[in-house]
Amino acid sequence: MLHRLFDLTGKTALVTGGSKGLGKAIARGLVEAGADIVISSRHEDELRSALAEILSGTSRQGRYVVADMTRRDDVHRLARQALELTGRIDILVNNAGSNTPQPFDQITDEAWDQLVELNLTSIMILSRALIPQMKERRWGRIINITSVLGFVSNFHRSTYSATKAGLIGMTQGAAIDLGPTGITVNCVAPGPFLTDLPGRLLTEEQRRRMAERTILGRWGQPEELVGAVLLLASEAGSYITGETIVVDGGYLAR
């Protein structure tokens, strides 16, 4: 019974930003639960090698689509190609996102526009494009990866926090609209996870302080986010919608 609740056999998932970090770990977890997979990112070489790792040792099918989520034409093309390649997308994980730290009074219009387009607008466009075929089957899962910084911000993170807080609000509204059609919409909010992005943006001292703020006293590993996503993607989470599951090692509890 428990195994069947989390079984995704027969489902197809699309994970944006799926070539590395959290997206790659999520894609692997969905495949291990039985789903076929489509991953996207901007770089074909990274997608090719990541897809091989994601599918390794499984019998699942996988494809990739090169797309820049800051370009609206690319987002529309991603939706079309994903459906052409697979025939259906049952589970959409909107994971692609980025961060450009700037003091509030020094935020450039270009940086603001780019982060809003990537972290918020692209999610609306891609979800909207894939919803009709979910409605036809009266079954769908949309999972948006937000952040604990959508609840509490930090130095030079006002733009990022604005987009991630906006994503939580958009998720709640979408859940209300789509609930009667059999589609659930939820967020997962990671805390400090050890991926390439914080590795580039933070000094060693900043990383140490972030770890110390968590109750567990450490950064999370990408695989530790997978359980929350599988819950929301499967029948185990069929009565959960409009919610944000925080996976942060106790970061927000301090």
Image (tube, rainbow, N blue to C red):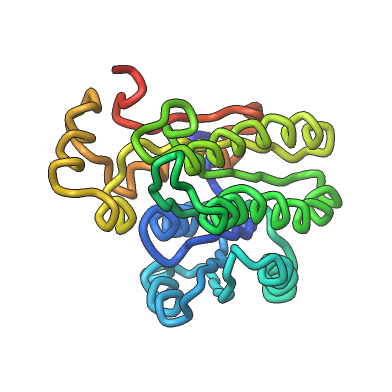
Q: Quadrant of residue 247?
A: top left
Residue 232 falls left or right of residue 100: right
Instruction: State the residue in front, 238 or 150.
Output: 150
In this rendering, the count of numbered labels is: 0
What residue occupies the far front of the structure in this picture? 105
Instruction: Work out whether residue 212 can be spotted.
Output: yes
Residue at 57 percent across and 69 percent down: it is: 68
Q: Going by the image, does 161 lie left or right of 121?
A: left
Give the image location of residue 29, x and y in percent.
Answer: 43, 53
Q: Is residue 215 left or right of residue 108?
A: left
How far from the left and from the top, in percent, is residue 185? 66, 38
- Residue at point 86%, 52% (across, down): 136
Is residue 5 visible from the viewing direction of this image?
A: no
Residue at left offset 70%, top offset 74%:
81
Q: As rendered, which of 114 and 135 lies closer to the eye?
A: 114
Q: Which residue occupies 73% across, 31% down?
A: 173
5, above or below 221, in the image: above
Asked whether 164 or 177 is in front, the reply is 164
Instruction: Please provide percent x and percent y for residue 192.
Output: 31, 39
Q: Is residue 28 above or below residue 101?
A: below
Q: Quadrant of residue 113?
A: bottom right
Residue most extreme to the top? 254
Q: Return the x and y of residue 106 as percentages of the image width and height.
A: 44, 46
Give the quarter of the figure containing the C terminus: top left
* Foreground residue among 45 and 200: 200
Q: Please identify the residue farthest to the bottom as the structure is shown.
A: 45
